[in-house]
Image (cartoon, grey):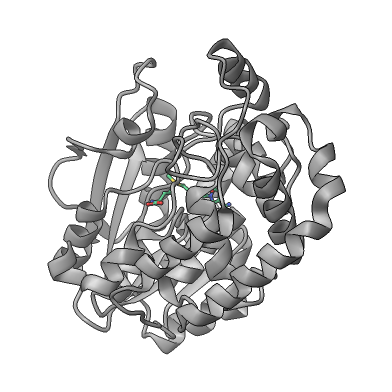
Amino acid sequence: MEAVIGRAQSRWARVGPYYAMFPMDYVGEVIGAHTSPGDAVLDPFAGRFSAPAVASYMGRIGCGVEISPLGWLYGKIKLAPAQRSGDVLRRLRDMRDAASGYKSEAAHLDEFFQMCYCKDVRRFLLACRDLLKWKKSTVDATLMAAIMVVLHHGIGRGLSNQMRQAKAMAPRYSVNWWKSRGMEKPPQVDAAKFLSDRINRRYKHGVFCYKESKALLGDSCKVLASTEAETWQKTNGGVKLLFTSPPYWSLVNYFKDQWLRLWMLGCAPSPAVRAHAYEKGFYSKDEYRRLIETVFDRCAQMMRKDGVVVVRMDARQFTRQTVLGALDKSFPGHKKAGKLAVTKGRTQTVLFNNGGAKIPGERDIVLVPA
Ligand SMILES: C[S@@+](CC[C@H](N)C(=O)[O-])C[C@H]1O[C@@H](n2cnc3c(N)ncnc32)[C@H](O)[C@@H]1O
């Protein structure tokens, strides 16, 4: 991958533990096969922005829409991180200095947080949560994204007590797990030192800025109809490649699995069920169908006549039929290129499955103009 997208870019391309993400090599292959430099690539369910970012790194113009602030944050800094590491490190020092003002709040966090983080890390995280303006400032977004990567991980690899990196387990489960192993005491970590090493490593081979590419935050049903999306599409002569993987109905809850990172971004300090409006789409079949149909319909209006559609979808019957039905309706002038391929190897499902459930994996569909 490094040979295709450059060394600096490859340092940033994988930023962001997320769920159900595209394997990077697959992204490069699809973009290389269906677009040329200068073409516009759209992903309306961008996740951690693998498709818009790699498209940009390959000389295309990417646009992604993501409803989760976490995915959007990863996307923002993959397209245009802070241009000077010194600015990010300065902001990191500000946070380190501000942490002492959060002693009382840190002491009052619940049992999960007391076992997960040592007191200095708790204070530091609360300062960052309160003071970083990550939606507005690129420097703050870059620092916040660096924190997201190491917020929970194995001991010594992140800021937390022993945790998985991709997915945050529920608070009670984690507490019981630590207790049953005598691991109630969190590791001592110097958060500022830990992060400054990571930030220096990230900037080691340089930086980039893809001004024409876009990371848009919000519900694709609305965002794709906005002036900002329309301007992006017109400026770039229409979308050549629609490349996406829609949410998997009822299988993955992108809010619950990322509750701890979302807490850092201002959400509730627990994975409350249906805490976020967009979760509804993952439970109600009608809502799910409406989402998929509305989004593909809007995307079809943004496409060039010679545009290609590549969709990787969950292979279970309801999701697959909903997606295929929506594509048939929105792209009547397109035909399937080849048979519906069963994806092999490290697919999203393989990457995020706990190993227990029998999940049939993914299907890829490619539609080309008839
Ligand atoms: C299967 S994941 C995409 C993963 C992505 N291909 C990657 O490589 O990271 C589907 C994504 O759709 C997002 N999503 C769900 N509903 C959405 C909506 N209404 N508008 C925009 N994004 C949405 C979810 O938050 C999730 O990140």
Quarter of the image with the C terminus is: bottom left
Left or right, residue 3 beside residue 325: left
Residue at 16%, 59% in the rendered image: 29
Q: Residue furthest top?
A: 180
Rendered location of residue 33, percent (x, y): 14, 64
**Residue 249 visible within the image:** yes
Residue found at the far bottom of this picture? 235
Q: Nearer the viewer, residue 234 or 357?
A: 357
Residue 244 in the image: above or below residue 323: below
* Residue at image point 51% right, 55% down: 71
- Figure quadrant of residue 223: bottom right
Can you say which quadrant of the picture contains the N terminus?
bottom left
Quadrant assignment, res 41: bottom left
Q: Identify which residue is drawn at 64% across, 21% down.
A: 175
Residue 306, image quadrant: bottom left
In this view, the residue in front, 48 or 114, is 114
Residue 340 at x, y = what percent?
A: 20, 40
| Residue 332 to residue 230: above or below | above
